[in-house]
Image (tube, rainbow, N blue to C red):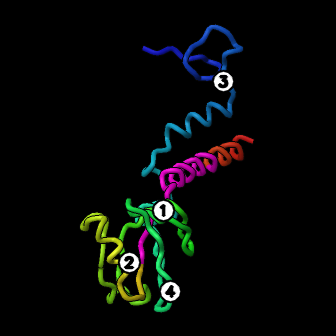
Amino acid sequence: HYMFCSLCLAVAHATKAECISEEERAYQAAMRKQTPSKNLSAADKRRQERLVRGLVLQIPYSGKKPQVDASGHFATEFDKAKVGDEILSVSSGSCENKQNLKLLWSREKHDLGELAEALDSEPPLAIRYRTADVDAQLERLRKRRVMEELLSLRLIAG
């Protein structure tokens, strides 16, 4: 059995000085309610899926090829991709016509040694990659949702 303080509704404590503030209590309640996949709006779910699925970088016919390291990550900055971004797949063809995209290399299906061969293929190429800080972005998204809920609680209370 648990006992709770009648003033702050936190777990019972000896003195009033140990009571938590109303903002802290609202923050704790919001954190308990918030889980990574639950209570997300449709837009936030799409944004989260897009982060996990990765971004696409198009290399046109006359484009230069990116430099990658042995672990399948970008070794130098290339267009929107930054150093350390993970390459998920390489396809030949243009992103405008997705039916004509032909998978050349995929992290799940192919060996890392075949990545360089796939990148040496004739352009245009479509490279799907994931930013190095996906977990940090998902955490920022979760924290943003908590802060939005706290602000709405303040507006309701005030």
Q: Residue 116 location, x and y as percent?
A: 35, 73
Of circles 2 and 1, the one toward us is 2
> Could you tell me the amino acid type at mark 3?
Ile
Residue placed under numbered mark 2 in the picture: 119
Q: Work out whether mark 4 precedes mark 1 in sequence or the reverse, and give the earlier one.
A: 4
The crowd level at tag 3 (other Cα within 10 Å; few <14, some 14-19, many 20+) is some
Of circles 1 and 3, the one toward us is 1
Q: Work out whether mark 4 precedes mark 3 in sequence or the reverse, and give the earlier one.
A: 3
Asked whether the viewer can see residue 78, the reply is yes
Closest to the observer: 56 or 38?
56
Disc 1 is placed on an element classified as loop
Q: Main secondary structure of the magenta part?
A: helix
Of circles 4 and 3, the one toward us is 4
Q: Residue at x 49, y 64 (%)?
A: 75
Of circles 3 and 2, the one toward us is 2
Separation of residues labelled 4 and 1 (CA atoms): 19 Å
Looking at the rendered image, the quarter that the C terminus falls into is: top right
| Left or right side of 90 for 61 | right
Q: Work out whether mark 2 precedes mark 4 in sequence or the reverse, and give the earlier one.
A: 4
The crowd level at tag 1 (other Cα within 10 Å; few <14, some 14-19, many 20+) is many
Residue placed under numbered mark 4 in the picture: 63
> Could you tell me the amino acid type at mark 1?
Asp
Of circles 4 and 1, the one toward us is 4
Residue placed under numbered mark 3 in the picture: 20
Region in magenta: 127-148
Q: Residue at x 50, y 37 (%)?
A: 32
Disc 4 is placed on an element classified as loop
